[in-house]
Amino acid sequence: MPRTPPPSRLNVLFIGNSFTARNDLPGLIATIAAAAGKRLDHRLISAGGASLRRHWNSGEAARAIAAQQFDYVVLQEQSTLPIKNRDRMHENVRLFDEVIRKAGARTALYLTWARAHAPESQAAITEAYESIGRELGATIIPAGVAWEAFLREHDEPVLHDADGSHPTLAGSYLAACVAYRAVFQASLPREVEIDGLTKDEMKSLQRAAGAISVPTGK
């Protein structure tokens, strides 16, 4: 059976909080896509510190999913909930996955990173996302896995902002590279221009993003 070619244009809804909004993650992915001759149309529904349950209860995200034809809906859970209450996180994802499927879109899970002071918590975050991803056949965007691997080998560029939680531009760019690979099912383009990052920094981050496995779901 012939393999489906990777998409050249996607319409994606992002639902999350400042871990997605900071440094405009959707815009960074769109910039990478444009450098590869592809196009990402995107919308972001974000609230500071919000969990997926807060987004669910507000109704805005569910209405957006039903009203517009998206290829993917990217879900980002509140950053510590996968550690504190894995079951609650899984319930939240299941609620959204049902309406996403009904709308004809695909669920993608934005697997985030551990706080700078607690790198050991990455294992729990990763497991929480990957287990619900396997259950639902969702695409995983393993940004936190790429962060973990990068931080083992590199001190610079710095990925965590001064608060030890939010991403710097470099941290968001690494996440964007992983997200591009996951949703476009393609290798990263060689030449991308991002104001605020040097070419050497970008190459180092691209190598880290390209080195990890990116599951694409069912």
Image (tube, helix red, strand yellow):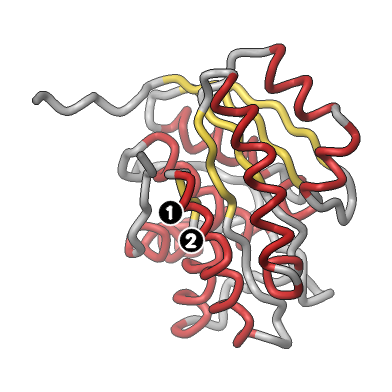
Q: Position of residue 79 (x, y in %)?
A: 74, 64
Question: For the point 90% across and 34% down, which residue is it?
Answer: 58
Query: Could you tell me how far apart the alpha carbons at marks 1 and 2 are, in whole angstroms?
Result: 6 Å
Question: For the point 76% across and 45% down, which residue is it?
Answer: 21
Q: Position of residue 69 (x, y in %)?
A: 59, 14
The three-letter amino acid code for the residue at tag 1 is: Arg
Helix, strand or loop at label 2? It is: helix
48 to the left or right of 24: right
Q: Position of residue 144 (x, y in %)?
A: 55, 66
Name the residue nearer the viewer: 200 or 18.
18
CB within 8 Å, label 1 to label 2: yes
Q: Is residue 159 above or below residue 132?
A: below
Q: Position of residue 1 (x, y in %)?
A: 9, 25
Q: Tell me the residue that label 2 is attached to.
A: 130
Q: Tell me the residue that label 1 is attached to.
A: 134
Helix, strand or loop at label 1? It is: helix
Question: For the point 77% across and 47% down, which residue is it?
Answer: 52
Name the residue nearer the viewer: 197 or 94.
94
The three-letter amino acid code for the residue at tag 2 is: Glu
